[in-house]
């Protein structure tokens, strides 16, 4: 029960966004619906008056009066349509826009440890296909449903006003489509949820194929990848087909039964007219028309509620995913490192009983430069990931100036630490935007970051406004790394972590980038590197050597070479 309450509470936090700062658009849209209902009822009355006038039935209106009334209704129709065309799109646009922005803001609040363990396709699907489904199948139909409900009330009132004996017959016959619709309605909610689930897999397959395009081409695996994509595409289309089938069956059966009920009330009305019950031809026709109005509500009722149930499930799925945060928020720490970073018997594994790091203890003093080296799989990148709070499930301790990492808030940690990775993400925007991450900084600070990172030649040649292309396609590997270094320097975080930043660069560019990092003053730098270049290694204050997840050796370059141990072997082989 508690879980259900929590789910409903989270759902309300999302659904209120449909109406927040959107009440005027909602009110005008509802006014258009009310006017439309009134116009439909007035048209039914006009139809009865016109037929009875033509057939000599009971009416006090003249043809001229009915013509004037018709022109007035047409004018109101134009006004009603204009009001709906203005307000309804504005309401829907703002509602879904606020929903997406709120969800994305909540997503950005997740800590790194949680996000890296999640499937991003969940959010891609939720903010694209699912959001579109909520807009189309629920919010858009909400006005239609309310209009049909008001139309039903007005139609029933008119029925009893025209003929109290015939009205109950019409109501009983109207219940037939409702029974049929309610029997098929729950299938729609199940089908919509299935579409969302299959679309999530489709988005994942599409994203993987595009992200790994170069790998696909290199290994000539186009056929295999196309097969995976086609399979996922078929599954989502089959799910959509089932949803459309249920909807078509529901609509078809509802229409058939609705037509039967209209014919039934027409025949009963004909019998009453012949039997002297006071039913005129105009009343018979208007009853059939009002039956159509009531059937619209009956037909829409199960569809609306099944879509509402399905959309609630989509909202709950997103809300529940966003509510997961593996690492609770801790306390804030000063934005400076005075003593250093201490590792105490650090142990960690991605899977139980399979540790990647075992009993790692080390100290990185503030303001100094450290290299972390070792063979592939020795745990170097994992160590940096833990220093960035990539997981809280480690044994031992990681201390920043004595404060255990798990007790530090992630916002505070990211103020303290900056990371330069091998795979630099570059937005499809200008060089300046990628350096500043779309924030405002004084020009002198930007110039300093550009100078220290070695980006000056690029800026001088192409300018700060040069577009980098999708994921930096217009930049070389070295230029992307320098952009990454510049954005880290601009943040002025006291700790800089570098994870194989030069692995994909040519030797000359790699040396330049590594030198630029070592030239920085006032930062604590921990650099994971595979490049064992003597000129660079001599510049580090300490080298931490990992072997099979443990600390094999630690010291300066000359000291480690003199020991002729594991580092000596690594260095010798690399040469």
Image: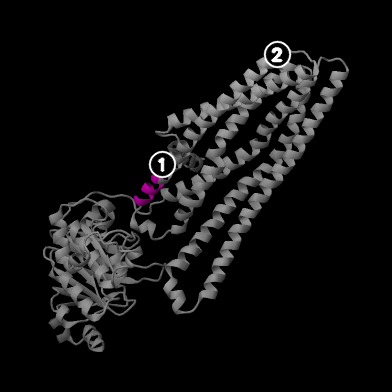
Q: Which residue is label 1 attached to? A: 98
Q: Nearer the viewer, residue 318 or 307?
A: 307
Q: Position of residue 375 (x, y in %)?
A: 30, 80
**Quick one: label 2, few (<14), some, or many (20+) residues within 10 Å?**
few
Q: Nearer the viewer, mark 1 or mark 2?
A: 2
Residue sitting at x 27%, y 68%: 480
Mark sitting earlier along the chain (1/2): 2
Q: Residue furthest top?
A: 60
Q: Position of residue 161 (x, y in %)?
A: 71, 16
Residue range corresponding to the magenta coloring: 101-109
Q: Residue furthest front?
A: 64
Q: Position of residue 92 (x, y in %)?
A: 48, 39
| Figure check: 86 above or below 497 | above
Residue 260 visible, this orientation = yes
Residue sitting at x 25%, y 69%: 479
Predominant secondary structure in magenta?
A: helix
Instruction: Describe the element under mark 1 as helix, strand or loop.
Output: helix
As drawn, is 179 to the left or to the right of 380? right
The label shown at residue 62 is 2
Based on the picture, tell me whether residue 73 belongs to the magenta stretch.
Answer: no
Q: Position of residue 446 (x, y in %)?
A: 17, 58
Quadrant housing residue 97: top left
What scheme was used to colour the molecule?
one colour
Instruction: Calculate the distance from the C-alpha at mark 1 to the C-alpha at mark 2.
Output: 53 Å
Instruction: Describe the element under mark 2 as helix, strand or loop.
Output: loop
Q: Nearer the viewer, residue 308 or 379?
A: 308
As drawn, is 195 to the left or to the right of 403? right
Kindly indicate whether the residue at mark 2 contacts the one at mark 1 (C-beta within 8 angstroms).
Answer: no
Which image quarter is the C terminus in? bottom left
């Amino acid at each position: 029960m508690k879980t259900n309450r929590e789910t409903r509470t989270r759902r309300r936090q999302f659904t209120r966004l449909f109406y927040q700062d959107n009440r005027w658009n909602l009110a005008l849209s509802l006014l258009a619906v009310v006017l439309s209902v009134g116009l439909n009822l007035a048209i039914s009355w006009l139809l009865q008056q016109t037929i009875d006038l033509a057939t000599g039935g009971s009416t006090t209106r003249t043809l001229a009066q009915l013509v004037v009334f018709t022109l007035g209704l047409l004018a109101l129709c134009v006004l009603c349509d204009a009001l709906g065309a203005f307000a309804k799109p504005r309401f829907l646009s703002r509602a879904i826009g606020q929903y997406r922005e709120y969800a994305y803001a909540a997503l950005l609040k997740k800590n790194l440890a949680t996000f890296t363990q999640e499937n991003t396709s969940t959010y891609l699907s939720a903010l694209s296909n699912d959001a579109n489904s909520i807009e189309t199948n629920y919010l858009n139909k909400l006005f239609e449903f309310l209009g049909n409900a008001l139309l039903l009330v007005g139609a029933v009132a008119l029925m009893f006003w025209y003929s109290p004996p015939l009205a109950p017959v019409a109501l009983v016959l109207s219940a037939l489509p409702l029974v049929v619709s309610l029997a098929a309605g729950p299938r729609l909610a199940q089908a919509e949820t299935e579409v969302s689930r299959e679309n999530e897999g489709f988005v994942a397959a599409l994203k993987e194929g595009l992200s790994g395009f170069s790998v696909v081409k290199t290994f000539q695996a186009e056929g295999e990848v196309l097969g995976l994509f086609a399979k996922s595409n078929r599954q989502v289309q089959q799910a959509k087909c089932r949803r459309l089938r249920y909807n078509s069956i529901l609509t078809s059966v509802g229409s058939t039964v609705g037509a039967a009920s209209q014919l039934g009330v027409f025949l009963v009305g004909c019998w009453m007219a012949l039997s002297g019950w006071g039913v005129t031809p105009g009343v018979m026709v208007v009853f059939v028309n009002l039956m159509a109005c009531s059937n619209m509500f009956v037909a829409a009722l199960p569809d609306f509620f099944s879509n509402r149930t399905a959309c609630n499930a989509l909202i709950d799925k997103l809300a529940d995913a966003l509510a997961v945060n593996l690492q609770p928020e801790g306390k804030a720490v000063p934005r400076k490192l005075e003593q250093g970073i201490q590792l105490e018997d650090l142990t960690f594994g991605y899977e139980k009983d399979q540790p990647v790091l075992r009993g790692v203890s080390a100290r990185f003093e503030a303001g100094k430069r450290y290299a972390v080296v070792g063979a592939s799989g020795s745990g170097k990148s994992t160590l940096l990931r833990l220093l960035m709070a990539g997981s809280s499930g480690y044994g031992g301790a990681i201390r920043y100036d004595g404060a255990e990492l798990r007790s530090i808030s992630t916002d505070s940690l990211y103020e303290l630490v900056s990371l330069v990775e091998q795979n630099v993400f570059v937005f499809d925007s200008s060089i300046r935007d990628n350096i500043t991450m779309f924030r405002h900084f004084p020009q002198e600070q930007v110039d300093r970051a550009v100078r220290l990172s070695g980006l000056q030649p690029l800026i001088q040649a192409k300018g700060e406004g040069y577009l980098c292309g999708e994921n930096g396609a217009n930049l070389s590997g070295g230029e992307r790394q320098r952009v990454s270094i510049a954005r880290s320097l601009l943040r002025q975080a006291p700790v800089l972590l570098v994870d194989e930043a030069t692995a994909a660069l040519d030797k000359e560019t790699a040396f330049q980038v590594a030198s630029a990092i070592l030239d920085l003053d006032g930062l604590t730098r921990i650099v994971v590197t595979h490049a064992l270049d003597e000129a660079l290694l001599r510049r580090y204050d300490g080298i931490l050597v990992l072997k099979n997840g443990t600390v094999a050796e630690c010291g300066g370059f000359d000291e480690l070479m003199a020991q002729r141990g594991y580092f000596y072997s690594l260095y010798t082989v690399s040469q």
